[in-house]
Amino acid sequence: MKLHPAPTVPTQDRRPHAVVIGSGFGGLAAAVRLGARGYRVTVLEKLGGPGGRGGVFKQDGFTFDAGPTIVTLPSLFEELWTLCGRQMSDDVDLRPLTPFYTIRFNDGETFRAQSDPEAMRAEVARLSPGDVEGYERFIAESEDIYKVGFEQMADKPFSSITDMLKVVPQMLKLGALRSVWGHVAKHVADPRLRIALSFHPLFIGGNPLSVTSIYSMIAFLERRWGVHFAMGGTHSLVKGLVGLIEGQGNHLRYNAGVAEILVKNDRACGVRLETGEEIAADIVVSNADSAATYKNLLPAAHRRWWSDRRLAWSRYSMSLFIWHFGTKGTYPDVAHHTILMGPRYHTLIADIFQAKTLAKDFSLYLYRPTATDPSMAPEGCDSFYVLSPVPHLGGGQDWALEAEPYRKAILAELERTVLPGLGAKIVTSKVVTPVDFRDGLSSLNGAAFGLEPAFTQSAWFRPHNKSEEIDRLYLVGAGTHPGAGLPGVLSSAKILDTVVPDASVLV
């Protein structure tokens, strides 16, 4: 097997070479951290531009974020700029949002989530005065969980079962065997508050009715650090990270899909592109979907743990149906983030996660960035996307047939609730289905968040950041520890500081 260096790299650069597969937030953060530690880095992206799930597209004068839109814990981004001797504020205009989002229940009542404790107590009291004390107890326990589940665990590798056993007593003490829903229901009685305080795991592909209450930390994380928006869209953060990588003298290559991770003597030694080109590397970091990394990129002969059989019976997150659209005219009364709850909660979640059926009703997340940044649409217009959780492709839906009727049903619901007259105002439109997650983002089963964050697929049970299959292969992103969401994927890259050898060792 003959390996060739990336042709864009000067041959006199003797730094150890790290190849990063994928330019999502996890891959970009990994590249910055490796560059700061003395590695020569090449980021390979199969799409035509950076960002992965955090990409962007422009259509008919509108700018659309393709993926994550809720930015929490901005300090994790700021660390990356600091590593490069720069300030994030020089490149990214990050603004806190108040409220974080408005939840609209099916009966028309609303709940405005925000960081101000007094304002939150007032919101709880407005819906259910008897639940204020219970809400405070829930937030206090959420903070305790955050201090263990995030501060002590999120950026620590779980490479051995011993790592897991060390934290089990603390996790059990915090009620980790209870679900997020069970944790919330223990403290508040009002069914609307139970929904408002428990739905957060859906942001990271988890089922609130079954996922461990460790994920209750999200409620405190938002309250403590807020929710932010990057002017120009979330993709502004992607552009900023690309600038850091290039400023380190490192490179990104687009339209460079990886076909195989090359292995020699049980050690990753490079990659082969879909074009047949081979690129040598001292280490390989995959920001691709973790299940797809093992099933599609690492030959079965080198897999003992993540076999095809194990991957087949693993549990995968739900997928998403996303409709991007732009309107002529604006909706000034619609918030930046709105969550529209449907008539069902428990049974709808069961339809999505267990039965994997496409229900006639739905709950929706509506994103209107022009509420904060009018530049994302032509003058006098609004930019939106609306997202509906749906089963992954294991449900067997034929999205070539289902997509348009489903979009029309969502349109009717938006017109009925918060966007009256929407159909007549739409001037541009694009739909994303689970098929796009499978084909465009290489997600196994079209799962939007990779492996479901069930207890038995978290921490040590999740694909390790330092591959358990071969040496010098590392994983970052939603499908590895600690999981999905921007804080999770950025923390997965931070773990590389612990598990990847210093560049000086490999020189």
Image: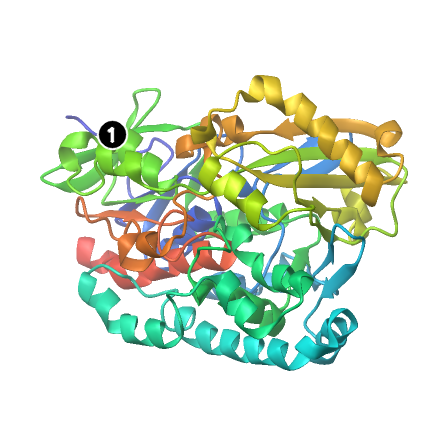
Residue 101 quadrant: bottom right
Please, is residue 148 above or below residue 506 in the view?
below
Crowdedness near tag 1: few (<14), some (14–19) or many (≥20) residues, C-alpha within 10 Å: some
Mark 1 secondary-structure assignment: loop
Q: Position of residue 270 (x, y in %)?
A: 24, 36
Q: Residue at x 48, y 44 (%)?
A: 24
Q: What residue is drawn where x is 87% and y is 31%? A: 425
Residue at the far top: name it.
Answer: 401
- Residue holding disc 1: 4
- The part of the image, by quadrant, that contains residue 460 is bottom left
Q: Is residue 279 left or right of residue 54?
A: left
Which one is in front, 173 or 12?
173
Q: Quadrant of residue 438?
A: top left
Q: Is residue 8 left or right of residue 384?
A: left
State the residue at coordinates (83%, 29%): 426
In the rendered image, the vertical position of residue 394 relative to residue 38, given as above or below: above
Image coordinates of residue 33 in percent, x first then y, are 39, 57
Residue 321 in view: yes
In the image, 503 versus 299, the foreground residue is 299
Task: Say above or below: 79 vs 455.
Answer: below
As rendered, which of 17 and 434 lies closer to the eye? 434
Amino acid carrying mark 1 in the image: His
Residue lying at the far left of the rendered structure: 265
Q: Can residue 46 be seen?
A: no
Identity of the residue drawn at 88% across and 28% down: 424
